[in-house]
């Protein structure tokens, strides 16, 4: 399912829509609870293997941009992806990741990889900054309410259109009902 969404919608996003990013689709990829909680104590508040699988399929071989805190919370570069970490600290360095100091710089880097899409994978600060520029949001809505200390911005239906939704019910491995949604900027 994920591949179909990506291919169909890539072709539907005209170059003029992505002009501000030089033709690259800027996508946010996030899991949020019913109140838009996305994290607590620098960790995800849930463990949802189904979402990890979805994340892996979507981002495989693609550039993923993350805030320095999210990178440190993951603790390593994710295999099979081109990891880009954003920081304001010019002395920050890590092997196996590219380091940038702005979103525009990350987009320029993605262009050099010859891909059509870059995925911003969090956390809250970088989601907030990238939100206004983003063309697409892949939102896994977890149908539960968690305690949290970081939030995703509200996806306002005046500005965003839901173009795909796939609901999954909880099972023995996934403790919460959840929906894979794809939103496109109107
Ligand atoms: N549910 C989800 O989908 C999801 C996904 C990812 C993360 N999370 C959660 O989100 C939380 C982390 O989010 P967070 O907001 O605390 O941190 P974050 O966004 O991961 O990282 C923030 C850091 O990124 C750098 N940064 C951010 N904006 C920048 C900009 N415009 N230019 C240059 N550098 C910039 C700064 O690094 P320096 O301080 O080094 O300058 C800043 O301190 C954790 O709880 C994590 O588990 C949830």
Image (cartoon, rainbow, N blue to C red):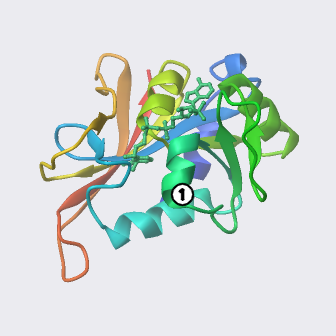
Q: Is residue 154 left or right of residue 13?
A: left
- Residue at 64 percent across and 63 percent down: it is 60
Along the line of sight, which residue is nearer the eye, 64 or 182? Answer: 64
Q: Is residue 108 above or below residue 2?
A: above
User: Whole-percent x and y of residue 103?
Assistant: 66, 27
- Residue at 18 percent across and 78 percent down: it is 171
- Residue at 23 percent across and 58 percent down: it is 178
User: Whole-percent x and y of residue 36?
Assistant: 24, 37
Q: Is residue 63 left or right of residue 41?
A: right
User: Whole-percent x and y of residue 8?
Assistant: 57, 47
Q: Is residue 148 left or right of residue 80?
A: left
- Residue at 31 percent across and 67 percent down: it is 48
Along the line of sight, which residue is nearer the eye, 89 or 120? Answer: 89
Residue 36 makes an appearance in the image: yes
Q: Is residue 117 left or right of residue 127?
A: right
Question: Within the image, what quadrant is residue 9 found in?
Answer: top right
Along the line of sight, which residue is nearer the eye, 163 or 80? Answer: 80
Q: Which residue is mark 1?
A: 4
Q: Secondary structure at mark 1?
A: helix
Residue 15 makes an appearance in the image: no
Residue closest to the far bottom: 172
Is the CB of mark 1 within 8 Å of ligand 1? no
């Amino acid at each position: 399912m994920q591949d179909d969404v990506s291919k169909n919608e890539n072709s539907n996003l005209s170059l003029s829509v992505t002009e501000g990013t030089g033709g690259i689709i800027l996508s946010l990829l996030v899991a949020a609870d019913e109140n838009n909680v996305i994290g607590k104590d620098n960790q995800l508040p849930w463990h949802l293997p189904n979402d990890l699988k979805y994340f892996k399929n979507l981002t495989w071989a693609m550039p993923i941009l993350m805030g320095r805190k999210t990178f440190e919370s993951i603790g390593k570069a994710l295999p099979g992806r081109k990891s880009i970490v954003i920081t304001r600290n010019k002395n920050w360095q890590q092997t196996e990741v590219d380091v940038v100091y702005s979103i525009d710089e990350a987009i320029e880097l993605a262009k050099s990889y010859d891909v059509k899409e870059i995925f911003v994978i969090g956390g809250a600060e970088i989601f907030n900054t990238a939100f206004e520029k983003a063309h697409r949001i892949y939102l896994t809505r977890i149908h539960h309410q968690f305690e949290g200390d970081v939030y995703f911005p509200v996806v306002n239906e005046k500005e965003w259109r839901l173009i795909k939704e796939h609901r999954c019910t909880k099972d023995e491995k996934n403790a919460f009902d959840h929906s894979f949604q794809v939103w496109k900027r109107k």
